[in-house]
Amino acid sequence: MQQVDKNSKLPLYYQLMQLIVSEIDNNMEVDEKLPSERDFCSKYGLSRSTVRQAFLELEQEGYIYKAHGKGTFVSPKKLQQELLKLYSFTTEMKKIGKNPSSRVLNFTCIACDRNLARKMKREEGSEVYSFLRLRLADDKPVMVETSYVPKERFAGLSQERLEQNAMYDLFTHIYGVNFTYAEERFQAVPTDELTAKYLRIHRSLPSLKIERFTYERDQIIEYTVSMARGDQLIYSVKLNK
Amino acid sequence: MQQVDKNSKLPLYYQLMQLIVSEIDNNMEVDEKLPSERDFCSKYGLSRSTVRQAFLELEQEGYIYKAHGKGTFVSPKKLQQELLKLYSFTTEMKKIGKNPSSRVLNFTCIACDRNLARKMKREEGSEVYSFLRLRLADDKPVMVETSYVPKERFAGLSQERLEQNAMYDLFTHIYGVNFTYAEERFQAVPTDELTAKYLRIHRSLPSLKIERFTYERDQIIEYTVSMARGDQLIYSVKLNK
DNA sequence: TGAACTGGTACGTACATCATTACCAATGGA
DNA sequence: TCCATTGGTAATGATGTACGTACCAGTTCA
């Protein structure tokens, strides 16, 4: 069982929030009952005040709702948003002798929900373009990528343009982007349904999740979550001194 | 300029520590003078007590030393940390507020089998030191590392020496290693028995596998396989342009 | 020598975090 | 109805974080 870390600099209630959100997103249904506050206390060795603080913030963020005497439950609204918010991922398609290509499966303009706004350090409700791309190596699907970019920074971006140009070519040549830096995060995760479907793999096979945050000065101009099959080398860094 | 984030859950003094360490590692020389405490106050909008708390901990960790009336300076010994922007367990863990440590579980001299010989581009049967290390974050095991280094390049290497020094300190200071470049590969894989045992996780949980090849000229002088639990963020790359 | 730097020390205040304890109020099953 | 379980509320104390202020002490240079 995942545990909270009492030596971490991060507050315990905050760690607990992350654990619960993760549990809700991965393993729970709308309106499903959460363990009681006192259960969490004994399970994680925390005081009830701490558990309640985590619950309170989760309630304010719309993840859960509470009913006096009955219990605490998964909120419907947030989960919908979570389902829409596909796991995005960063493509660092390395040339390993394969022929890379990609297909844009979806292109929309959306308003940032709280979660995405936090990830991208933007206002909740501000508009971003969101698009889903399937990356292929030798015409075999190896990765599903969901990207988010600020609408105001990439005005006029369309599915057609994305299909006809490499994304970073668009960024640099059409939109004059000057990257400041990028950050990538790697995690091995169980394969989710969407990924399994698009990559045509079984859910028992783990996947590699890559999140990428691209900055222009202090603004995040791209947030991408990529899901890749874990049984193939899809990332390699070369570092010259 | 990189700034501290007053809304972060991480303490301000801790964020400042990270900024200063990063600055020292990337842009500063040994014995170079740091800006004064009061400079940091105005630069980052912090009180002097907070800046001093950061300085105090950096001094205790050996990054800096202070001289009354003169100023604060980069300490000689700690500098050569991130000569390469390679994965460093120590720095990654510190980045997320955890306390890193490691234990050497096993140290032997073996003859390369066919597989290892191919990986390291060596003769089959040639001797290499092999050692197994457990990496811990806040005393919780999070990674198992198996390393292989050529015996002739690291004559006299022993478990004691590894336990008493950071591996890259040994390489550079004792063995005069001059890295040419390194390559890292990431994969999500099912958890093997050894990893499950040492990390105390279930085999159904996927793991993140990191392979590292370190070169000195055209010779591979280190081959390391790291297995990390996949449900925890263990890696984040910053790519400065 | 004295002014202007540097770091060193001390104290008070405020707030966040977390634990502990006690009790209240709504629910639902025996 | 009784009572165990659930969430709701309150008060107290310990500790960590952060700010502000004041003053001390060593260094440097005009």
Image (cartoon, coloured by chain):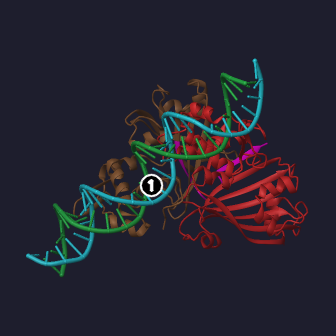
Chain colours: A brown, B red, C green, D cyan
Identify the residue at image location x=53%, y=33%: B45
Identify the residue at image location x=89%, y=60%: B153
| Residue A92 in view, yes or no | no
Q: On the picture, is B30 further left or further right than B47?
A: right
The three-letter code of the residue at mark 1 reads: Gln
Q: Which residues make up the magenta segment? A: A224-241
Chain letter for the residue marked with disc 1 in the picture: A
Which residue is identified by label 1? A18
Identify the residue at image location x=72%, y=45%: B65
- Figure quadrant of residue B225: bottom right
Q: Specify whether residue A227 is painted magenta.
A: yes
Image location of residue A197, percent across then percent down: 47, 55
Which of B83 and B193 lies nearest the eye of the viewer?
A: B83
- Figure quadrant of residue B50: top right
Magenta: main secondary structure equals: strand
Which of B32 and A18 lies nearest the eye of the viewer?
A: B32
Neighbours of disc 1 within 10 Å: few (<14), some (14-19), many (20+):
some
Can you say whether B148 is above or below C13 in the image?
below
- SS class, disc 1: helix
Screen quadrant of the N terminus of chain B = top right
Identify the residue at image location x=71%, y=41%: B24
Image location of residue A203, percent across then percent down: 50, 62
Q: Specify whether residue B147 is painted magenta.
A: no
Can you say whether B13 is above or below A108 in the image?
below
Image location of residue D22, percent across then percent down: 53, 34
* Total numbered labels placed on residues in the image: 1
Image location of residue B233, percent across then percent down: 56, 54
